[in-house]
Amino acid sequence: DAGITQSPRYKITETGRQVTLMCHQTWSHSYMFWYRQDLGHGLRLIYYSAAADITDKGEVPDGYVVSRSKTENFPLTLESATRSQTSVYFCATRGANTGELFFGEGSRLTVL
Amino acid sequence: DAKTTQPNSMESNEEEPVHLPCNHSTISGTDYIHWYRQLPSQGPEYVIHGLTSNVNNRMASLAIAEDRKSSTLILHRATLRDAAVYYCILTRFNKFYFGSGTKLNVKP
């Protein structure tokens, strides 16, 4: 039982296509986050969710859509992928009573 | 958004202590100071966090300045496995904002 899993781990797509990155957790943590990390840079927050049906924007939300109908899943959708969205995407969770984030292994997305 | 400033890179010798500094002059009273590290090709992992008092755990120690405008992550005895990018983060309203971090190189 991995705790937090991301899929797919690797994805190549073309400009203009819709892409969904999945994030699933088994801990029932309240908070879930999506970050992107570009080569040689730190992580930037895209969106986060405090609970099912509650989401909010982070630093770089443009071009992304999220939903959270169930506590355990937090999909990130690129409705029309652009080359600038080529990145490694990390999902993270945090329990309501814990201080730390737990990260998935990342999803590497390449937009051609 | 609360910002942190860290050196881009630092170098240490194996089995020696390492002090990783972080400046956060715009910190507010309710911001927590978190440290994470990221090993190559992995997601970040939690190291330590604190609010006002110094903190110790099995991985490291966190020393927080009295005015809270800076903090230092202390690795007591660096190993080759500690080579990573270390991020100092201020958390506010459950948002974690990562900066560029400090790349720590550990020499054998």
Image (cartoon, coloured by chain):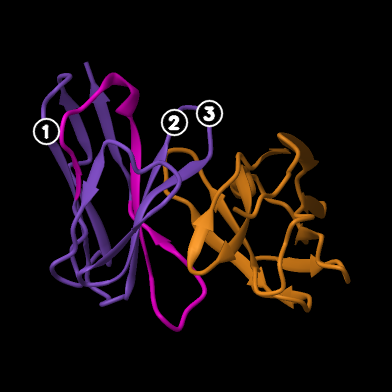
- The residue labelled by disc 2 is A38
What's the magenta region? Answer: A76-104
- Taking the spot 29% from the left edge, 34% from the top edge, the residue there is A108
Q: What is the three-letter code of the residue carrying label 3?
A: Gly
Tell me if mark 1 has few (under 14), some (14-19) or many (20+) residues whose alpha carbon lies within 10 angstroms of its own.
few
1 or 3: tag closer to the N-terminus: 1
Tell me if mark 3 has few (under 14), some (14-19) or many (20+) residues whose alpha carbon lies within 10 angstroms of its own.
few
Q: What is the three-letter code of the residue carrying label 1?
A: Gln
Q: Is residue A84 magenta?
A: yes
Tell me if mark 2 has few (under 14), some (14-19) or many (20+) residues whose alpha carbon lies within 10 angstroms of its own.
some
Q: Image quarter for residue B50? A: bottom right
- The residue labelled by disc 3 is A40
Which one is in front in this view, the residue at disc 1 or the one at disc 2?
1
From the viewer's side, name the closer residue of B27 and A73: B27
What chain does badge 3 belong to? A
Q: Are marks 1 and 2 on the same chain?
A: yes
Which one is in front in this view, the residue at disc 1 or the one at disc 3?
1
Q: Are marks 3 and 2 on the same chain?
A: yes
- The residue labelled by disc 1 is A18
Chain ID for purple: A
Label 3: element kind: loop
Q: Position of residue B78 (x, y in %)?
A: 72, 52
What chain does badge 1 belong to? A
Chain ID for orange: B
Cα distance between the residues tagged 1 and 3 = 26 Å
Which quarter of the image is occupied by the N terminus of chain A?
Answer: bottom left
Q: Image quarter for residue A24? A: bottom left
Q: Do callouts 1 and 2 mark residues in contact (Cβ within 8 Å)?
A: no
